[in-house]
Image (cartoon, helix red, strand yellow):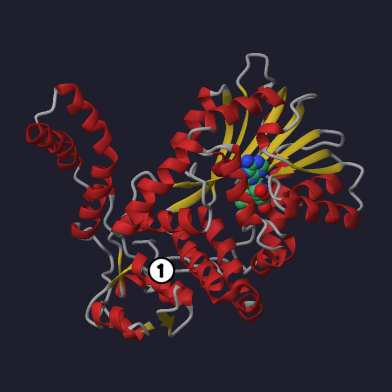
Amino acid sequence: MSKLLGSSEAKQSPSFYYPKYPIECAGSSQYNNRAFYTACILVPFFFKRLLSLSWTSYLYLAAILYLPLWGLSLIYFSWYASYPLDQQFTAESLPISNFMEIIDDELKQKYPDTSKIPMEVFFESYFDGKINLKQDCLKTFEQRYSWASFGLTLNQIKFFLFQFIPEMIWHSRSQDQDQVRDHYDRGDDFYNAFLGETMIYTSGLVSDFDKKESLEQLQQNKLHDVCERLQLKPGDRHLDLGCGWGTLVNYAAKNYKSNSTGITLAVNQAKYATNKSKELGTLDNAKFVCMDYRDAPRRPRYNKISCLEMAEHVGIRKFSEFLDQIKDMLEDDGLFYLQIAGLRSAFQYEDLVWGLFMAKYVFPGADASCPLYWVINKLETAGFEIKSVNTVGIHYSATIGRWYENWMSNKDSITSKYGKRWFRVWEVFLAWSTIVARQGSSTCFQILAHKNLNAFDRAAVLTKPL
Ligand SMILES: C[S@@+](CC[C@H](N)C(=O)[O-])C[C@H]1O[C@@H](n2cnc3c(N)ncnc32)[C@H](O)[C@@H]1O
């Protein structure tokens, strides 16, 4: 009997947010690699003939056209791929007007009730105030296959080619600083409105599947889990890279008596964390520094290093350098805990539409969100041995779902201070990401690693399941 979500046999826990009809979108298995590579050969050849170019110019042209052709092929296949046939459920096409009121006349004409609206057109129009929702946003997104299509748009491919890719290649200090401060220094009250009192901007952990644990409990479970996995001891020199508002550092300093240092590039976060440390009485062994991770003091070395969802900001291009730096900063018998958000390799088109939305609006510059094999490959190549990996996407969904509930309960105060547009951007981000993390489009990995040395005492870090 099927235990898949949506079937009557599926066991449901009050901690998670369940779909009524989970639909599989088309994706990588419908993408035609052969057609793409043929285009990569023939299109530059066409221009070579047309402009009487040399074979060397042909090779240059082929290299230049590779990415644009890839973008165009993704647009083509995302629009023309049919949904996988072995669906357990099919999406009932319902009139758009069941879900939203289109205020803008031009848009209304373009998308009559009988059509589906491309997701990118929907969220851009919603942010611009051209559409109002008729019901709760999360509920609307749970039924998105009834009113939305997931074809990539030219706007998204332009963003990908002319902003995402250049920023991914560049990743200079000043670019990182601008992007990080623009995001995290928006206002502590903005973040408090969804993160709640723990001010932790990373996945929590559900520990009791039989009840709906609060956000605070999920984060408490995570803090405990991280410190236990790191086997934190009094006096340990502990570094938390990308410490956010400092909650892990203060928690470790208070409960494990470690000498913990948190580093963040966001000015407000460092101030907030230091004030919190005064309040909690951890000033003696918790320290916060506002600086780029590249400038973190490397000596004396650290016994424990944690990095919770900052490495995405490091970027694909700088990732290996970043791991070399961690290896250099870590004692030979030290432990490294990496929590990192990732994407599935066998993508569905919805994943790409969501990923580009996130890169544009929520985490600009955080491009190192990759499949697990990529992260592990980088870690092992840098000389780490992986002690354990946990995939916690479903816990992330539970966490983001609670962020969504908090956000919606603060609608009036956020709208009056930050405006309707910011409110709506985060409303869509949190609603959609609750689903995206639940269905595996994106996930989160908790990785414990240490240096891969012959002399490393592997028996000393044997972990029992927590
Ligand atoms: C998603 S938040 C995670 C915060 C925290 N680890 C938590 O669990 O709440 C990412 C953090 O990485 C920090 N960050 C991003 N790029 C950075 C850089 N180049 N140097 C230092 N910190 C950086 C941000 O300031 C932010 O604190």
**Residue at label 1?**
124
Locate residue 405, reporting x and y percent.
59, 73
Depicted 76 relative to depicted 465: above or below: below
* Viewer-nearest residue: 445 or 198: 198
Camera-side residue of 203 and 74? 74
Q: Can residue 339 be seen by looking at this rendering?
A: no
Q: Secondary structure at mark 1?
A: helix
Height in image: 391 above or below 374? below
Q: Residue furthest front?
A: 51
424 on left or right of 7: right
Rendered residue at 40%/80% (across/down) = 131
How far across and down, in percent of the image, does residue 176 sit? 58, 43
Q: Quarter of the image for the N terminus: give it.
A: bottom left
Q: Residue at x 48, y 69 (%)?
A: 428
- Locate the C terminus and report the quarter of the image it occupies: top right
Q: Residue 69 at what x, y percent from top left?
A: 23, 43
Asked whether residue 11 is in view, the answer is yes
* Type of amino acid under label 1: Glu
Residue 312, located in which quarter of the rendered image? Answer: top right
Residue furthest top in the image? 454
The crowd level at tag 1 (other Cα within 10 Å; few <14, some 14-19, many 20+) is some
282 up-or-down from 331: above or below: below
Residue 24 image point, x, y percent: 31, 60
Nearer to us in this view, 230 or 108? 108
Question: What is the tally of numbered marks visible in this picture?
Answer: 1
